[in-house]
Amino acid sequence: MINTSLLFAMELIGTIAFACSGALVGIRKKLDLLGVIVLAVITATGGGMFRDILIGNVPPALFRNPFYAGVAVLAAILIFFTIQSKRLLKTFMQIERYNQVFNSLDAIGLGAFTVVGVDTAISYNVDSYFFLTLFVGVITGVGGGLIRDIMVCEIPSILKEHIYACASLAGALLYVGTWQIFDPDIAMITSALIVIAIRMLARHYDWNLPHSKLS
């Protein structure tokens, strides 16, 4: 069994990282404070909502225990007002600096939520369905970012850049394959770090899947 403290830490880390990434997108798109908060909350909780619906955990935990939504709101407000200073706003508007911060946060959230999704599927005894367990892990990782991108009228990151969903799938596969063989806590941490490492390396070296050549 996974240490509950580790699971809580993973959920908290994923929530804060994704909330901050959603807030950054909202600020970049010049949304007002409410818009930034909404984008942060949906980024942080959207994947978990998809996960709970898939495994029959309804109503989703988001609505039964709003703790993580509250964390996302606080993170969004903090990011919003922190970036209002002229110096930080000028730095933030530099696209390369923005991309560095955004992709780092997004990678951390993706890694944390992918393994949380797999662990939740296992705890609900759907791990006998191998594909479902993997899918639950991946959709927990990418679901919030998918909604975020659609809400700001962008092509979702999972469809176009830097080995996004593939990184989540690699971590989910590793966790599913190792949680019964090794210590579950070590398997969870290692799998999350693999997702983060793949995402960061993909950005650094500009790794992408083949794209269409149509002009």
Image (spheres, grey):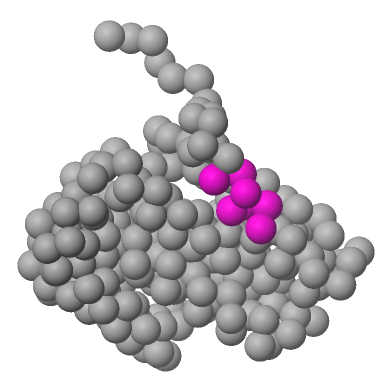
The residues colored magenta run: 193-200
Residue drawn at point x = 40 percent, y = 89 percent: 67
Residue drawn at point x = 37 percent, y = 54 percent: 102
Dominant SS type (magenta): helix
Residue closer to the observer: 108 or 119? 108
Residue 123 to residue 194: above or below: below
- Which image quadrant is residue 37 in? bottom left
146 left or right, relative to 124 = left
Residue drawn at point x = 12 percent, y = 72 percent: 33
The quadrant the C terminus occupies is: top left
- Which image quadrant is residue 42 in? bottom left
Residue 164 to residue 115: above or below: above
The quadrant the N terminus occupies is: bottom right
28 left or right, relative to 198 = left
Image coordinates of residue 53 in percent, x first then y, are 46, 69
67 left or right, relative to 138 = left
**As drawn, which residue projects farthest toward the right?**
181
The reply to whether residue 129 is visible in this rendering is no
Residue closer to the observer: 95 or 155? 95
The reply to whether residue 164 is visible in this rendering is yes
Residue 198 shown in magenta: yes
- Which image quadrant is residue 117 in? bottom right
Image coordinates of residue 19 in percent, x first then y, are 35, 69
